Amino acid sequence: MNHAVPDGIVTPAIMIDVDVLDRNIQRMASSMLSRALRLRPHVKTHKTLEIAAKQLAAGAVGLTVATIGEAEVFAAGGATDIFIAYPLWVEAHHAERLRKLARTCSIAVGTDSAESATAMGRQLGADARSIDVLIEVDSGHHRSGVLPGEVVDVARAAAASGLNIAGVFTFPGHSYKPGMPRDAAGNENEALGRASAALEHAGFEVRTISGGSTPTALLDAETLATELRPGVYVFGDAQQLELERCTWNDIALTVAATVVSRHESDGGNVRRVVVDAGSKILGSDRPDWATGYGRLPEYREARITALSEHHATVVWPDSEELPALGTRLRLIPNHVCLAMNLVDEVTVVREGAVVDTWKVAARGRNN
């Protein structure tokens, strides 16, 4: 991989190395195929039609999205099988949008309570059968989702409201901590197994058992899931690096930035540079275990220690020469999903040259 920031790029800018991207997409697709698992990638990570098309061409059975708005963008872009993987509270305007989606593609949504399932069925009315519902199970992340033993009550309410019960899903979000991916995968498998068994015992057909996250998707752990929904794997990011769930060579997305200020350690100063990329392009996520707000692929001991809106402070290692003013550097965001939602378009590069520009089509589609 050529590490230079190509001439002509005005910083700050998000760059995607298309060769690394393609390799990441193919590796995940091949892993799913070898384990007879369906791949339904979460496209909230990239929000671009071009990357979704690559994932589908590589064998993904459909797409996962976060919102109805994202579903509308990708359906308009040609996707025919979409899962909105969060519990929805459906009001009249949501129901109308879901009806329109169901006319053009297969659409499934999440729910995690009898009340929300009943409200969804009431709002959809005679069109309820056109929407599949998956019940979310809490497998240890403790965000949304019911306990495995509670899925039957939700399923009965959904069925009574005219909805199709397709199965169960979970998000093992606690895999995003050091040392936790394998334990989280085990928690996921247990929760999905208990929930699907409870539904089948109650007389429901379980067609889909959906799980997965980027930290767990490539593990060789046993799984009862029929499909997985990783998202970040297409790009990698600083979190995945520090969790040891990707390598430096797997990083497809970086932010091009320019050194605008530099300071040696004389007089007690911290040895550092300041670049022209801040929280409004890198995002501001920093888990309590992370070593900074991002990493630099060419300077692996450097750390982004502070963010302003338009600038980042990078503490520089003593073992490396402090870069001159005007030097162009590549930064790896902690969390690429945030970074992609902060720009209108991204620059596509191959072997150090700009080859395309992609629109972030679903940017801002938050409802």
Image: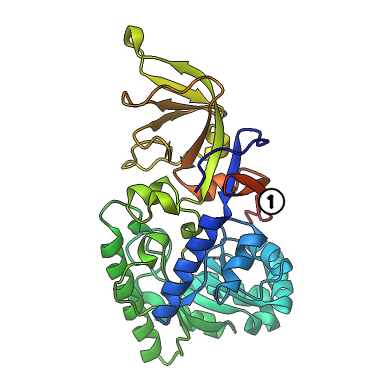
Secondary element under disc 1, as helix, strand or loop, is strand
Residue 74 sits above or below residue 121 on the image: above
In the rendering, at what x and y percent does residue 335 appear? 47, 47
Of the 4 image quadrants, the one containing the C terminus is bottom right
Single out the residue that lies furthest toward the top.
Answer: 267
Single out the residue that lies furthest toward the bottom.
Answer: 203
Quadrant in the rendering for residue 19? bottom right
Is residue 167 something that shows in the picture? yes
Please tell me how crowded label 1 is: few (under 14), some (14-19), or many (20+) other residues with Cα within 10 Å: few
Quadrant in the rendering for residue 76? bottom right
The residue positioned 46% from the left and 59% from the top of the image is 233
Residue 4 sits above or below residue 164 on the image: above
In the rendering, at what x and y percent does residue 346 appear? 64, 47
Instruction: Tell me the amino acid under the disc marked 1.
Output: Asp
State the scheme by which the image is colored: rainbow
The residue positioned 70% from the left and 67% from the top of the image is 92
In the rendering, at what x and y percent does residue 86 appear? 52, 64
The residue positioned 33% from the left and 41% from the top of the image is 288
Residue 72 sits above or below residue 133 on the image: above
Is residue 83 something that shows in the picture? no
Residue 323 sits above or below residue 341 on the image: above
Residue closer to the observer: 285 or 348? 348
**Which residue is disc 1 drawn over?**
356
- Residue 213 located left or right of residue 44: left
Quadrant in the rendering for residue 11? top right
Residue closer to the observer: 349 or 91? 349
The residue positioned 56% from the left and 37% from the top of the image is 256
Count of numbered circles on the image = 1
